[in-house]
Amino acid sequence: MPAQEGHVPSGDRDEVSLWERLERPAPAPRTTLTARRIAEAAVRIAGAEGLDALTMRRLAAELGVAPMAAYRYVSGKDELLELMVDFVYGELDLPAEAMDWREAMRTLALRIRDVLLRHSWVTRATWCAPTPNQLAVPERALDALSGLGLDADTAMAVYSTVTAYVHGAVDAEIGLTQMLRVRGWSSREEARSGLASQMTWLVNTGRYPRYEQYIGDATRKDDPQWQFETGLDCVLDGIAARLDA
């Protein structure tokens, strides 16, 4: 969940970060509008209507408050996005401290994927500044790697490699889902049928024998969970081999 909520004096916005402001105690009496309520409402809108539909005016209507009310907490859409991303990452259950490095990294990757698939708009929030709940992720990962004797740069490279795989795989999965929706297809099987004539022509050129073999032999085409976990294990196997060397 977002950090402790507090009133935002208007003159402070250019001097301190959103998170420092929100940790200040709120004046009494506390208003019914809080940073958490703002984040929840904004996440609801983004999930139902897409990130482009989210405006400060649309948010105010969702909250049932005056259009300027949210500005007591955030200076605009950039800070609103920080609140939203922090709220989403607050759903992430970090791996237990008792796990070894590989189990912890694998668990973390699977759980990040689940969160991103539930909130696909987060993958578009690449311009968002780091938030408290986001920073808890590399903190836990680096802690899991801390007993391996790695220098700081290598440990971060290991973490970044795993999360780069997660984000790349999730982006591809979300992209496929969006393509199905845009074209009016309800499943991957229906997509294959819709693309059959084009794919048949391409394969029949004889230029793609390995891909043709894949089409005929593969049995996991519609199993994104297996595909993700197999790719993840390949990444972790590579890291483990390098560490052993």
Image (cartoon, helix red, strand yellow):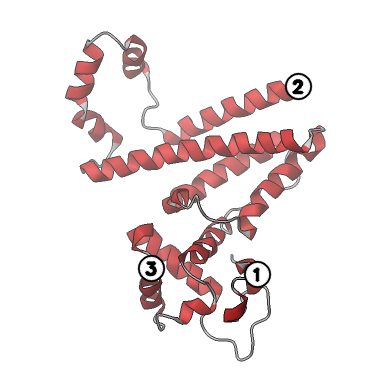
Image quadrant assignment for residue 14: bottom right
Contact between labelled residues 2 and 3, with CB atoms less than 8 Å apart = no
Q: Is residue 154 above or below residue 200?
A: below
Q: Which residue lies at the image location 34% right of the left edge and 62% below the top edge? A: 53
Pointer 1 local density, CA inside 10 Å: few below 14, some 14–19, many at least 20: few
Relative to 75, residue 150 above or below: above
Pick whichever, 157 or 110, lies toward us: 157
Q: What amino acid type should be assigned to the residue bearing mark 1?
A: Val
Eye-nearest disc, 3 or 1: 1
Amino acid type of the residue tagged 2 in the rendering: Asp
Q: CA distance from mark 2 to mark 1?
A: 45 Å
Q: Position of residue 42 (x, y in %)?
A: 44, 67
Mark 3 or mark 1: which comes first in sequence?
A: 1
Task: Identify whether 10 is placed above or below 96.
Answer: below
In-front residue for pair 230/242 = 242
The mark found on residue 55 in the picture is 3
Query: Marks 3/2: CA distance?
Result: 51 Å
3 and 1 marks in contact (CB < 8 Å): no
Q: Nearer the viewer, mark 2 or mark 1?
A: 1
Residue at the disc numbered 2: 244
Q: CA distance from mark 3 to mark 1?
A: 23 Å
- Write the residue at 75% across / 21% down: 244
Residue occupying the point 57% across, 80% down: 10
When asked about the image quadrant of residue 30, the answer is bottom right
Question: Whole-percent x and y of residue 23?
Answer: 67, 73
Which residue is label 1 attached to? Answer: 16
- Helix, strand or loop status at disc 3: loop
Type of amino acid at the residue the image marks with label 3 = Thr
Residue 209 location, x and y as percent? 33, 9
Image-based side of 99 in relation to 166, left or right: right
Say which element carries label 2: helix
